Image (spheres, rainbow, N blue to C red):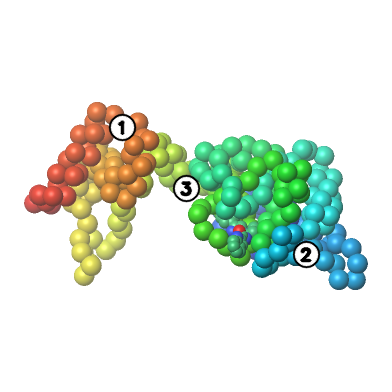
Amino acid sequence: MRIDVVSLFPEFVSQVAGHGVVGRAQERGLLTIHGWNPRDHAEGNYRRVDDRPFGGGPGMVMLIDPLQAVLKAAREADPRPAHTIYMSPQGAPLTQAKARELAGRERLILLCGRYEGVDERLLQAEVDEELSIGDYVLSGGELAAAVVIDAAARLLPGALNDAESAAQDSFEGEGGLLDCPHYTRPLEHPLGGVPPVLLSGNHAEIARWRRKQSLGRTWLRRPELIDRAALSKADRALLEAFLTELVAPGPE
Ligand code: 9WO
């Protein structure tokens, strides 16, 4: 997979993507990331990339021409067609399913805006899709692009080691529920003990407890995810038990 990042601070995104799983994916030849700066394609002594908005108001808007030129150069650097994404709070929400879809593409171009945004005509003409990583405003699209790269890169075949893959599979297998709590040594700590079931060695009981915790926490913290999840009869019984124990805690 190849990802081209178009940004006034392209090295910022490649820095973030140089570490951890994404860095390893690049070392393994699964992914290459290239940065492109619209300023390198701007004309004149001042190399302007922005101008004042028609209609007035504060701030600046990114010019069409430098962005069109830099996108052309990025596209021509590789013969494979590129799917072009603009990172903005006006976009469709990034989800695990969307990350999976993007990881299946051979080429992405991530366009990162700054200032008040990009001239709408450039977006209409050159962008396939607008993506948001959440309902908040950042100073630019770069951090959002880094999030998209991280979410997609870890889904490339071979990017994760066996333990990481198993964790990923089990997460996706939970069908959109939140994770259960985790514990490690020491067994006894001033902050408290560990749920005894995790020490029982009974793997079926442990799996039931984890599922119950996932269901309970999802109900408490993200009820809208419970509405969307297809819960089995056994799941409903586990959730019922979790909520009963919440009101009337048992001996454990
Ligand atoms: C700036 C601004 C100033 C006053 C009133 C409204 C305003 N909106 C913005 C704005 O959205 N600026 C953006 C900064 C322009 C495009 C790049 N920027 C950006 C992208 N901020 N946040 C994102 C982003 C991208 C993806 N997911 C979440 C946030």
Q: Could you tell which of marks 2 and 1 lies nearer the N-terminus?
A: 2
Residue 31 point in image, percent of width and height: 67, 48
Q: Nearer the viewer, mark 2 or mark 1?
A: 2
Left or right, residue 250 beside residue 173: left
What residue sits right under mark 3 in the picture? 164
Q: Residue at x 14, y 47 (%)?
A: 245
Towards the viewer: 214 or 130? 130
Q: Residue flagged by tag 1: what amino acid is it? A: Leu
Disc 1 residue: CB within 8 Å of ligand 1: no
Secondary structure found at label 2: strand
Q: Quadrant location of ligand 1?
A: bottom right
Pointer 2: residues within 10 angstroms few (<14), some, or many (20+)? few
* Viewer can see residue 24: no
Q: As displayed, is residue 187 above or below residue 200?
A: below
Q: Nearer the viewer, mark 1 or mark 3?
A: 1
Asked whether the beta carbons under mark 1 and mark 3 sit within 8 Å of each other, the answer is no
Q: Nearer the viewer, mark 3 or mark 2?
A: 2
Q: Residue at x 51, y 53 (%)?
A: 134
Secondary structure found at label 1: loop
Residue 181 got which mark? none
What residue sits right under mark 2 in the picture? 51
What residue sits right under mark 1 in the picture? 231
Residue 22 point in image, percent of width and height: 60, 53
Residue 187 point in image, percent of width and height: 23, 61
